[in-house]
Amino acid sequence: MKIFCPNINNPETLAMLQALYSRSHKSIEEHLVDMDSDNESQLKNEEKLKNSLKKYYLNYGHESIADCGSTTLFIEDVSIIAAKAIQETNLYNGQESSTRYIDFSTKEDSLKSLLNDNENKDYVKNKDLINSIIKDYFTLYHSVFNHTFNYIKNTKFEKDYNLTPNEKRAVEAFSFDVARGFLPSGTTTQLSFHGTLRGLRKHFLHLKKHPFNEVRQIATQALSILYSKYPNSFKEEDSISCKDHYSVDEYFVFDVSSLSSFNKDNLLYTFKNNTDVIVKNNGIHHNSSYMNGNVLIISNKLDYGSWRDLQRHRNGFCYPTIPQFKPNSKGFNIHDWYMSYLDDMHFDHLYCIIKNLEKLETNLDSDTLLNYLLPLGTKVDYIGSYNVEEIYYIMDLRLRDTVHPTLTQFLSDVVNNLTLTEYYNKVSELSNREFSLKRGKQTIFENDKAISDKD
């Protein structure tokens, strides 16, 4: 038996080294002898291997070779909507800025810049109104944070008590949980994507057809960067802009209430054949074939902020969605949990935003600009498919007092509808919780500086 790990970092070289197994019994050690020669010879041997990758992967279609090499993209200053599009694959591995721990109040100007770059015609035509809406959102976000922070501090701790750093972080984290419900979905964020060379190429080629111009531009730029770094795994024409793309109505989830079998009081459906769901969505989404689990969950009770957490579960399938503008008698289609923390002043502030959004809606040519201006607390239509194993994994991971309350509420309904008796105690424990001091310890920085500039 021989097991070894060569000291080679280039993913294209590693991919082609692995591919040599498919055509020869020769040990990789023998190939590595050549790789360990002088620098000049080593470079020539590596280049020869990488050129072979281009020949067999790109030209001959031996695609599994490109599964053997991986790399990481770091993507910054893109909207939360775009981040969800990038993560919309079961092959996604990466991290994203958390709205539950990071202050996003500095993102006002970057959202304006993003709309100017990607929705220029509508943005320029309605610039004053849009800028006013954005300013009002971030003012509301900051104010709701302060209001919630003071409420939690005054009700959960004794008067004039000095919070410890961990306690302060916990109160801040809960305050961000509330405030994030009023953060525009177009707010800029940053994320990473670690994937195989093949997976990255396939996914970003798909994203070139996305209905949002921003996502198409991200895909084009990402492919260009990947081609320049890995020319044996990507083609130059990959990075040419794609003119044909899906419309919003074609790409995103339909209104779940349109399903003939959907009852608004119901949450779950077990199924044997999900053809009806796919046909109603025209079968456009490239991952529709993954909707083959044992449980299909259909709901309109989840907010976009928490929907994003379930979307990242790779061993299931979460159909793509975006916030839709659906004003109602309460003023907005925002999850009740967020609204419960607003006082009259904040509700009036939100109502002014809604009125301006209604005014803006009548003067837009684009199908997408308004989506950027809808808050993360907006309820969305949710369709998820999971096998039994993944359902239990989600419950174990997400039914905790450190998870966002709107998500634990939703999963509590799932537990009750599926009669998952082993989780009844967890559901009961979470039913009356408000915030968790454990959140204050969830930091990756040794000397994490708590937010101190909130007045």
Image: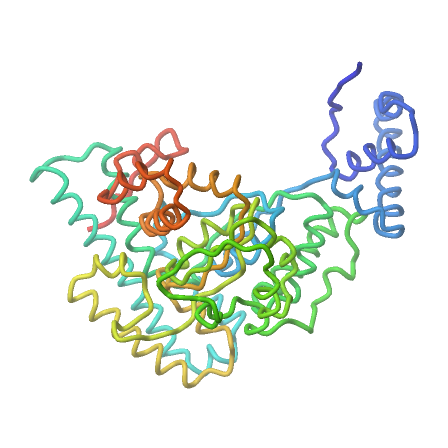
Query: Percent from the top left, x then y, of residue 33?
Result: 87, 21
Residue at point 91%, 24% (across, down): 26
Query: Percent from the top left, x then y, of residue 366?
Result: 51, 79
Image position of 237 (left or right of 275): right
The answer to whether residue 44 is above or below residue 382 is above
Residue at point 61%, 43% (across, down): 194
Image position of 130 (left or right of 115): left
- Furthest residue in direction bottom, as rendered: 363
Image position of 433 (left or right of 45): left
The answer to whether residue 2 is above or below residue 421 is above
Between 239 and 262, which is closer to the camera in this rendering?
262
Kindly indicate the quadrant of the structure image that contains residue 373. bottom left
Kindly indicate the quadrant of the structure image that contains residue 137. bottom left
| Label total for image | 0
Query: Percent from the top left, x then y, of residue 346?
Result: 20, 65
The chosen color scheme is: rainbow
The answer to whether residue 388 is above or below residue 88 is above
Residue at point 34%, 72% (across, down): 133
- Furthest residue in direction top, as rendered: 1
Image position of 254 (left or right of 217): left
Between 325 and 396, which is closer to the camera in this rendering?
396
Between 56 and 113, which is closer to the camera in this rendering?
56
The answer to whether residue 432 is above or below residue 120 is above
State which quarter of the image contains the N terminus. top right
Query: Percent from the top left, x then y, of residue 279?
Result: 62, 68
